[in-house]
Image (cartoon, rainbow, N blue to C red):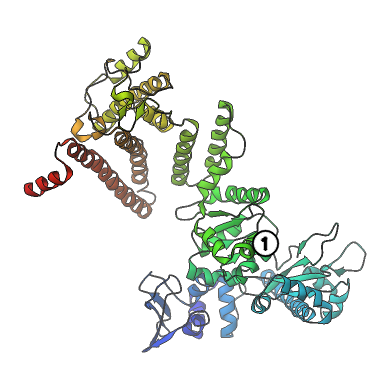
Amino acid sequence: MLSPQWLDELRARVTLSSVIMRTTKLQRAGREWKACCPFHNEKTPSFTVSDEKGFYHCFGCGAHGDVIRWMTDQRGLEFMDAVKELAAEAGMDVPRPDPVAAQQAERRASLVDVTEAAQKWFVQNLHGEAGQHAADYLRSRGFKKRIVEQFGFGYAPDSKVALKGALSDFDEQMLVESGMQISVDDKAPYDRFRDRLMLPIQDTRGRVIAFGGRILESRDGVAKYLNSPDTPLFDKGRTLYNLHRAGPVSRQSDRMIVVEGYMDVIALANAGIEDAVAPLGTALTEMQIELLWRMVDAPILCFDGDNAGQRAAMRAITRALPMLRPGKSLQIVRLPAGMDPDDLINERGPAAMADLLQRSSSLLETLWLFERDAQVLETPEDKAGLKARLLAHVDTIENQDIRSLYRRDLLDRFSAFAYPPRERSAFSGKGWQGGKKSAPGKLSPEVAARLRSASSGGARGELAGAVVAGLLRFPDVALAHAEALSHYAASDPKFGPAIDSALEAAEMLDPDGILPISGDIGQPAPPDKTRFAFLQEGYDPDCAREDLAEAVSLLVERPALEAALSAATARFETDPEGAFAEQQRLLKLKLEFEARLGQMASNRAARAASSDSDLPPAELQAEEQQMD
């Protein structure tokens, strides 16, 4: 346990500006420093650093913290890693929690000595005679000299004992424990990496903790890529390749790109895109997603355009769904079929890659498209299967609000796909075919009686009554929003029966031409038509359908919004601060909801009234100016 006194001593011993200026250019401003903020893009400096006060602050985005906060937020380090790095600079010993933990830390530190020594040896080999063909391979890939040095390329010779000889200062057990050698039963240990182009894998502090090796020529039965095994230093499920370099860059770009392999990361860096990381031989894990979310709110997952890339995207999505929380999600980019990032950059240039990243898709959109296209959907059973798969994904989301919103959005997409609007072959933009109205659709006596019964009664809410009347005029809108309307009807005992009957009536009409549902079946008198333009005779039918769709949207939103408000109010006893914030957010949404309702009910009607005027537009405008 680190005491507050010890942490204060650490902060006092480290000069904040000297730490920050390693990655951010500071300018002296009196007794303080200033710079353009590294946490958001700006042209005029609003970021200040005060060594006397021991904190930094941005007057633009509000970023604020001390030297430890800088290491965790800007460098992306874990708290204890930040403390240890600063303590080493300050010449302070970090209090050890217990002897066992201290012994493990010492062991890990000694293993880092092994991997760091191996890295230096690999680099020497690359620039020697033995590594000539590895150097030729790098040149053939077009990697710049700066990139080769920055990423630490090296070469492991084709020998089972060369590394052991080069690292003879370390005992054999340390070479095995660090993953540099393989020990099998009673045989002598031998080098793990042989005749491979080598890349160091580093932790968030930049220390070499493992390696990746790529073969230079294809050989049967030999894996193209080989990574170090899990060791006391290296846990591949908790490590992201290149995070220590990409983290500071992402603070400037507000973007983090995740590609499939480390060679993809290097290809992007070679093209000037330096905020990319990669998992290490596994699907993206929950811990890796959390690491990414510490950097940005919505990292971009970039996958190859083949089937394997699509499956990798879905594995990442299914891992992320239970973890989603407000403000934290994923963006997805799919490369053209048969291409990886290097191929795309070489064939179409860095601008093509940048453009693709700009057009990333949301997690929800990718989930919908994957499941929709997963199989041919020809029968009702096929479509029902699609709906079941979508809802199964939704049910894994732990956050209640996000789960509800995903359910609603995916069901709306499913409804639009499974129940597409029928062609209005009897209608054109100028009116009914031939300039005449066809006879309204005839219903069976049973359905007409049920609709008449469901629609009768006392006073109605204006919006719900207007929607019911509108659905009778435009049954095609009812069919287009059948799923959402059915869900709403189940929760509204007053207007639900009328909406259900209207949907049933719409489904029974002649599919060759959607006509109004017969007006002689006893539906209640519609609301004031001046407040709902889609109920007015002579109003453009296409505009009326658009307005009615908006009214349906408002109608089905209201119960969800009211339920969320009730839930937030109920939380006041257990979480007053969180409940208040949520209530304020929801009240703001409710005000926006009422504004949308008012705009639809008044502005649309005003537009309809204007369109009924016999005056030409210019004369109508003049008349309005005189009235003003």
Q: Is residue 22 left or right of residue 462?
A: right
Q: Residue at x 38, y 53 (%)?
A: 578
Q: Residue at x 53, y 42 (%)?
A: 368
Question: Which residue is farthest right?
Answer: 187
Q: Is residue 454 visible?
A: yes
Q: Is residue 603 above or below residue 186?
A: above
Is residue 264 shown above or below 424?
below
Give the percent coordinates (x, y) of residue 118.
77, 77
Q: On the image, numbered disc 1 is attached to which residue?
A: 261
Residue 284, placed above or below residue 19 = above
Furthest residue in direction left, as rendered: 626
Most foreground residue, 381 or 28 = 381
Identify residue type, mark 1. Answer: Gly
Q: Is residue 500 left or right of residue 540?
A: right
- Element marked by disc 1: loop
Label 1: how many Cα within 10 Å (few below 14, some 14–19, many 20+): some
Which residue is at the front of the view, 160 or 252?
A: 252
Q: Position of residue 215 (x, y in %)?
A: 79, 65
Say which quarter of the image contains residue 177. bottom right
Q: Quadrant of the N terminus?
A: bottom right
Which residue is located at x 43 percent, y 28 percent? 422
